[in-house]
Amino acid sequence: MKRNACRFTYTETLAVAAAVVLAFFVLASATSSLAASPGPGMAAAGKASKTERVEVRIKELHAKLKITPAQEGQWDNVTKVMRDNAMTMETLIKARSEGAGTKNAVDDLKSYSAIAEAHADGLKKFIPAFEPLYASMSESQKKDADTLFHRQRRGKAKAKAKAKAEMKTKAETKAVTEGK
């Protein structure tokens, strides 16, 4: 009997991928502006809370999307969702990290599942808030939004892979130094 390596359906996989995009979008620091000026800004962004980083992202997007006074009401709806999502994620991530040393594998998976579900829920809230804003945008603004969202997915995937590799290296180093 042939066994599938993946138990997720296409829809579930798509939802998780979309949730990851939202998480990176909402929770990420202003990568492009920080990359342009590495140094102290990079260290500060790494230590900032999720809610602090989303504030930086909101300001960056407002400027790059050239939000007009007529679009401010719709923009406010978008930023409210971004802030709410960031607070939810910060709470879940904090709870997960605080219990990291005491959780068994099942508890760890459950906490990760709660974070993944929050990503998906956040995206479900974000899209309806963003759609009217996007619809009201000029062609130039839409092009900028399309570019920002597309670049965001690419850049964040690379950053996540790099961070994951660094964490693995640190864990392996720690295991070797502790003699495990």
Image (cartoon, helix red, strand yellow):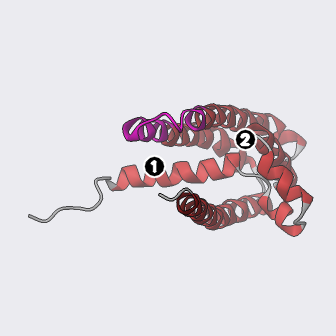
Asked if disc 2 and disc 1 are in contact, CB closer than 8 Å, the reply is no
Q: Which mark is residue 117?
A: none
Question: What x and y, as percent, mark residue 175?
Answer: 53, 58
Q: What type is the residue that disc 1 sits on?
A: Ala
Q: Main secondary structure of the magenta part?
A: helix
**Residue range of the region highlighted in magenta in the rendering:** 95-114
Kindly identify the residue that appears in the image at 55 percent across and 42 percent down: 119
Q: How far separated are the C-alphas under marks 2 and 1?
A: 22 Å
Q: Which mark is residue 15?
A: 1
The quadrant the N terminus occupies is bottom left
Graded by Cα atoms within 10 Å as few (under 14), some (14 to 19) or many (20 or more), the crowding at tag 2 reads many
Residue 106 relative to residue 64: left or right: left
Question: What x and y, as percent, mark residue 114?
Answer: 48, 35
Which of the two marks, 2 or 1, is nearer to us in this view? 2
Judging depth in this view, the residue of 67 and 162 nearest the camera is 162
Circle 2 — which element? helix
Residue 106 falls within the magenta-colored stretch: yes
Image quarter of residue 148:
bottom right
Task: Note whether residue 53 is visible.
Answer: yes
Asked if residue 136 is positioned above or below residue 102 in the image, the reply reads: below
Kindly identify the residue that appears in the image at 75 percent across and 37 percent down: 51
Residue 127 relative to residue 111: left or right: right
Judging depth in this view, the residue of 78 and 136 nearest the camera is 78
Q: Which mark is residue 50?
A: 2
Graded by Cα atoms within 10 Å as few (under 14), some (14 to 19) or many (20 or more), the crowding at tag 1 reads some
